[in-house]
Image (cartoon, rainbow, N blue to C red):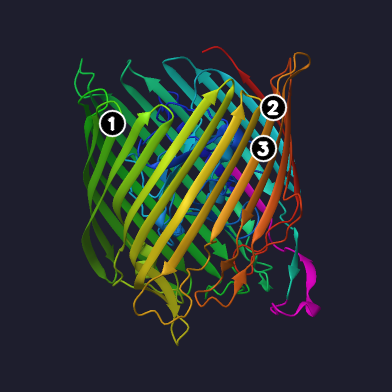
């Protein structure tokens, strides 16, 4: 209750601010399928997921992302449990994930938990595979994923109620107001679930089925409150101020491994995001130069309560808290219709604090200064060249001392558009990921840090083509990309003879692959999409001692298909639709030695929706995992089988 009260009070403060401003007023691109290209970078391999896909019952950030070429998702249970994403065989720590322009990756593991993304407030998702756009504060080794919120454009009222299997339920309310000059949008969501789905307990004997027994997942209930507020204030035709606030409070059980479930461990999580952006011409009357100032803040904490020491944390209590504050300045000078020069400068401060009753408090702080530039050059009518370069200087302080190091990153990209139906893309880039504060200084008495860790570094190249064709109401898209990447100084973990787990740098990895996507549609009535990824991710360390060189937790191939039908009858029904989705993933190694395999997975989802003629109401229903496939995504973590979901949404929009 205390978490929810603090979240609501902070949100009311954000609402007062949004009455004067809101989140950056980016152009919204509405698409019918996740095959469209993202708008921020003309040369990068990219995809967009539209709001229609995000709003289907039972959808999670992980389930919609896993159908995009190059993406692989790691889950640890139900929809509210940890889920992380990786691109093109990189790790989840090497992939920055943004919500409204604010990076969500924590400084304990470096990963972003997709289960905390408020999909109800998201307009679209932009996925940049391999190379991040200039708008990202980190040119990550694995690219970038940007969740962009739905912006206010006038008065509106939305309300929704959803129910699903295993006690899933949610209530949503959104209120918007304003006009062409000023507007605000406030959304509130309360959700929960029991998550007590059945799973097969092999009692730790993987190859002996005689003692297997079906159990229900214990201690897995969850209650979540989300508050999202944003707004905009157009000061003039080219000057605007925007604001964003997002708050999350969650309390849930922590189940542990399937072979040894935790019955009494609980965790509560709280996170608040603040963002403000001011965009204006560099000088009065100047239309070719634009300056943007961005301010962001992230405040997050988690409190584990483990009275019976079921998780092996070494303590009955573990409190983690982190803060990140950043300021960025971007200046862009237009040199022509298709050419510009840009400058970016910024500073960010982030802290991590870990508290245990029986251990000294661990505290670390990092300050990062950034200076870089961007250039775009249009050569004739068909060739676009893009160059990005940045110098990041990091200073890290902790009890063990101070570290300071510069990191130089950059990318060159090209887009060739010789004819209307064909586009060719190519990119060459160098990226760096610094060790997180948790990797440097540890998170507990058993998980210790290594202050000598070196940053991970990557060199990557990709080449791709996009072919589009429209004829007599039919439209087709075919996209294919090949990529090659080498990552050095990989950070991994090993256990000492004293039982401590400690990170260290080891060797190199080579990532090769091909991504393909095909889509065909007939007007607004029919759409079919197919995505396919082949990946060869190997450990190429010269001193490697293991015979197996294939990196674990990475499937060699992933495929997804979807077919969508929608019609608009003249009477009674304004629109009805039916969608069928098929997802297949190959087997993966569960350990580096290659002697334990996670089996492949095939799932089928079905969704139906209907909207009556005279009322702004959507009724949606879905069956997820129709064939009731039982699977474990992480070792010992069972996933739900077949689940049912239904949702009712009321959406009214007035004239702005």
For marks 1 and 3 on the same chain, the one whose residue lies earlier in the sequence: 1
Inter-mark Cα distance, 1 to 3: 41 Å
Mark 2 Cα shell of 10 Å, populated few (<14), some (14-19), many (≥20): some
Residue 428 picture location, percent across and down: 30, 49
Q: Quadrant of residue 311?
A: bottom right
Q: Quick check: 35 above or below 586?
A: above
Q: In this figure, which residue is indicated by the disc labeled 3?
A: 563
Q: Quick check: 473 above or below 125?
A: above
Q: Which residues are magenta?
A: 203-225
Q: In this figure, which residue is indicated by the disc labeled 2?
A: 566
- Does 337 lie within the magenta span? no
Residue 80 picture location, percent across and down: 62, 52
Q: In this figure, which residue is indicated by the disc labeled 1?
A: 292
Write the residue at 72% across / 51% down: 625
For marks 2 and 1 on the same chain, the one whose residue lies earlier in the sequence: 1
Residue 476 picture location, percent across and down: 54, 32
């Amino acid at each position: 209750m205390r978490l929810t009260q603090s979240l609501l009070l902070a949100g009311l403060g954000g609402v007062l601010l949004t009455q004067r401003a809101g989140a950056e007023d980016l152009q919204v691109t509405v698409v019918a399928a996740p095959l469209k290209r993202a708008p921020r970078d003309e040369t990068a391999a990219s995809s967009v997921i539209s709001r229609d896909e995000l709003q289907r019952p039972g959808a999670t950030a992980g389930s919609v992302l896993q159908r995009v070429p190059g993406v692989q998702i790691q889950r640890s249970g139900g929809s509210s449990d940890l889920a992380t994403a990786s691109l093109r065989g990189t790790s989840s720590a090497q992939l920055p994930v943004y919500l409204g322009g604010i990076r969500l990756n924590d400084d304990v593991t470096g990963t972003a938990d997709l289960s905390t993304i408020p999909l109800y407030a998201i307009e679209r998702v932009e996925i940049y595979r391999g190379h991040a756009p200039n708008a990202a504060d980190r040119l990550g080794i694995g690219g970038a994923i940007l969740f962009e919120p739905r912006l206010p454009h006038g008065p509106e009222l939305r309300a929704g109620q959803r129910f699903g299997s295993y006690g899933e339920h949610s209530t949503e309310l959104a209120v918007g107001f304003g006009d062409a000059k000023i507007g605000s949008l406030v959304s509130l969501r309360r959700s929960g679930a029991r998550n007590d789905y059945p799973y097969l307990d092999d009692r730790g004997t993987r190859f002996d089925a005689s003692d297997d027994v079906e159990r229900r997942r214990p201690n897995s209930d969850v209650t979540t409150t989300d508050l999202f507020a944003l707004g905009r204030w157009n000061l003039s035709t080219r000057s605007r101020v925007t604001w964003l606030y997002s708050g999350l409070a969650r309390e849930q059980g922590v189940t542990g491994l399937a072979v040894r479930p935790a019955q009494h461990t609980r965790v509560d999580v709280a996170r608040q995001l603040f963002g403000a952006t001011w965009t204006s011409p560099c000088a009065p009357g100047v239309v070719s130069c634009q300056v943007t100032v961005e301010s962001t803040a992230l405040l997050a904490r988690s409190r584990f309560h483990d009275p019976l020491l079921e998780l092996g944390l070494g303590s009955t209590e573990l409190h983690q808290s982190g803060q990140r504050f950043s300021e960025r300045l971007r200046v862009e000078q237009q040199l022509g219709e298709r050419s510009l020069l840009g400058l970016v400068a910024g500073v960010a401060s982030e802290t991590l604090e870990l508290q245990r009753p029986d251990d000294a408090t661990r505290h670390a702080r990092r300050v990062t200064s950034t200076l870089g530039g961007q250039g775009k050059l249009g050569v004739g009518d068909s060739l676009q060249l893009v160059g990005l370069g940045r110098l990041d200087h990091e200073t890290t302080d902790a009890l063990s001392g101070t570290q300071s190091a510069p990191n130089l990153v950059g990318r060159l990209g090209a887009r060739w558009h010789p004819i209307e139906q064909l586009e060719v893309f190519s990119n060459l880039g160098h990226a760096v990921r610094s060790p997180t504060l948790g990797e440097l200084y540890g998170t507990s008495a058993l998980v210790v840090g290594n202050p000598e860790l070196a940053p991970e570094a990557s060199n990557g190249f990709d080449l791709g083509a996009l072919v589009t064709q429209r004829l007599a109401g039919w439209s087709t898209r075919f996209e294919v990309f090949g990529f090659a990447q080498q990552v050095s100084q990989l950070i991994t973990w090993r256990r000492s003879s004293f039982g401590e787990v400690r990170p260290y740098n080891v060797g190199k990895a080579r990532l090769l692959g091909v991504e393909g996507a095909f889509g065909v549609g007939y007007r607004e009535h029919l759409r079919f999409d197919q995505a396919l990824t082949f990946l060869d991710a190997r450990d190429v360390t010269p001193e490697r001692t293991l015979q197996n060189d294939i990196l674990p937790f990475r499937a060699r191939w992933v495929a997804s298909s979807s077919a969508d039908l929608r019609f608009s009858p003249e009477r009674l029904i304004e629109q009805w639709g039916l969608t069928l989705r098929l997802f297949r993933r190959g087997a993966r190694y569960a350990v580096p030695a290659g002697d334990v395999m996670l089996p492949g997975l095939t799932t089928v989802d079905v969704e139906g929706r209907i909207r009556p003629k005279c009322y702004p109401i959507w009724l949606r229903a879905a069956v997820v995992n129709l064939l009731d496939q039982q699977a474990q995504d992480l070792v010992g973590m069972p996933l739900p089988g077949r689940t049912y979901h239904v949702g009712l949404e009321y959406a009214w929009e007035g004239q702005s």
